[in-house]
Amino acid sequence: MTARKVLMHSKQPNLLMTRRCVTPDEAGLVFHLIGVILAAGRGQRLSSDINLEEIGPKCLLPIDDCTLLERMVADLVSLDVGTITIVVGYRAELVQRACTMLEKEYGADFNLVRNDDYLSTNTAYSLHIGLAGAHGEAVILNGDLLYDRAILNDVVKAHQTTIAVDTAKPLTEESFKVRIVNNRIEEMGKAVPVERATGEFIGISKIVGRDIGAAKCLLEALAADDPNTYYDFIYQSLSEDGDLAYSLTNDLKWTEIDDISDLRYAKSIAGIIAAQR
């Protein structure tokens, strides 16, 4: 495997990774699919309107009597995902309690990884520690998502490293935008001008086995350079050879839940999403 260059968001350094990353197939390991749910964050914007101290992290938000976490677990189990790793931090004990019940309900195999530095780190560090023991394929979900299951199905079925992108939703300054040119991500992040963006990365992705070693190295470099950055930027580097795939949402419903308006929208589309299951 050739060394990959890490393309950062705002600083834009040319950080060349000189350490060679060993892929799972080179190490003689068997690929298997795991799920990774990122749920360490505190949800600061939403906490001004919702008592998250009582509810827990956003993955435990109940919508139509079912938490976001339960929906994700049910979907991952139905797609034959093996172990489900959940990176926890804020009110981790509430996630652990929920997982005890979900294990009985769905027969899920959980691996809870603690990010004790959740107040000073972001998703790059959380995914870095969440993938530490991974050797095969991984499907990754942000823990604050409500989505049409068909979006996840398409990503899981892909044979390449894949990210889900919404090219139809109106973009805002807060959208995590991507600009895709010739199948490569030329720009990525909230700072990308709306008029230049192809769409929004929605926080559902899959890393196939041949890329997992490179992804882990990229995450290590990202987290070391800036612990408070996003894992999403590894896909810009992984797109350099043109092999990254983009699964378009095609007007299927989804939302992340960052604030109270997002939560209201999630409740408004929950019935539509449930009808598609």
Image (tube, grey):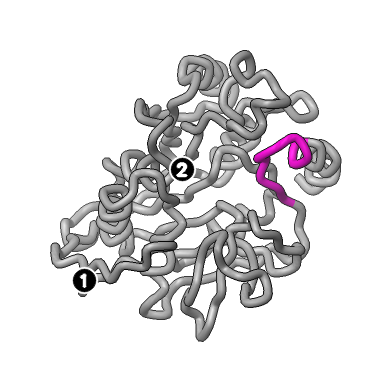
Marks 1 and 2 sit apart, C-alpha to C-alpha, by 26 Å
How crowded is the residue under tag 1: few (<14 C-alpha within 10 Å), some, or many (20+)?
Answer: few
User: Is 260 covered by the magenta stretch?
Assistant: yes
On-image quarter of the N terminus: bottom left
Q: Is residue 150 left or right of residue 85?
A: right
- For this orientation, the residue located farthest to the front is 11
Q: How many numbered discs sit on the rendered protein?
A: 2
At a point 67% along the width and 40% down the height, the residue shown is: 257
Q: Give the residue at mark 2.
A: 35
Secondary structure of the residue carrying numbered label 2:
strand
Residue nearer the viewer, 175 or 58: 175
Q: Position of residue 190 (x, y in %)?
A: 57, 59
Q: Position of residue 248 (x, y in %)?
A: 65, 67
Q: Is residue 213 left or right of residue 11?
A: left
Secondary structure of the residue carrying numbered label 1:
loop
Amino acid on which disc 1 is placed: Ala
Residue 245, placed above or below residue 277:
below
Q: Are the two marked residues, 1 and 2, in contact with CB atoms closer than 8 angstroms?
A: no
At a point 73% along the width and 26% down the height, the residue shown is: 49
Which mark is in front, 1 or 2? 1
Q: What stretch of residues is rendered in magenta?
A: 254-263
Q: Is residue 44 left or right of residue 262?
A: left
Q: Position of residue 266 (x, y in %)?
A: 77, 40
Mark number displayed over residue 3: 1
Residue 244, placed above or below residue 93:
below
At a point 42% along the width and 44% down the height, the residue shown is: 34
How crowded is the residue under tag 2: few (<14 C-alpha within 10 Å), some, or many (20+)?
Answer: many
Amino acid on which disc 2 is placed: Gly
